[in-house]
Image (spheres, rainbow, N blue to C red):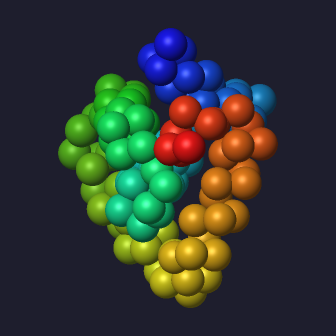
Amino acid sequence: MRGAGVAAILAALIAPATAQNITMDGVARSASLMRLLVESCPDIDRDVGNRYVNAFREAGEKSYGKQAFDRTLARELPRRAQEVREAGASAWCAAQRARMLGMGGAALFRK
């Protein structure tokens, strides 16, 4: 059941991009979002969050090549971390939780 939840959220996160070309930057942004959720938010199910990180990373590496994707992700992570610092972890986590729950992402959060 949890695997289905992960697949549903992954599909929901990627679905808006299917009308457009999915870019390496977009996949890196999704991976960085999940990584910072895991690192910054206390109510995240870390196992589920890490599965998302790995799924986005794997998709990026398969689609764009490991070295190219890893370089893109390495540039994206500090940007995302700055976003969290500027908003404050608590506020950022609350906003992301609301967004994810609105997309059916309950499996990502512990009750």
Relative to 22, say whether 77 is above or below.
below
Horizontal side of 66 relative to 75 (left or right) equals: left
Relative to 74, say whether 9 is above or below.
above
Where is residue 100 drawn, in percent x and y? 66, 45
Between 56 and 104, which is closer to the camera in this rendering?
104
Where is residue 109 drawn, in percent x and y? 53, 44
The quadrant the C terminus occupies is top right
Between 79 and 36, which is closer to the camera in this rendering?
36
Horizontal side of 29 relative to 35 (left or right) equals: right
Between 53 and 58, which is closer to the camera in this rendering?
53
Relative to 52, say whether 100 is above or below.
below
Where is residue 12 drawn, in percent x and y? 67, 30
Task: Identify the residue shown where x is 77% and y is 42%.
Answer: 102
Q: Is residue 56 visible?
A: no
Residue sticking out furthest to the bottom: 86
Give residue 36's quadrant in the image: bottom left
Q: Is residue 102 visible?
A: yes
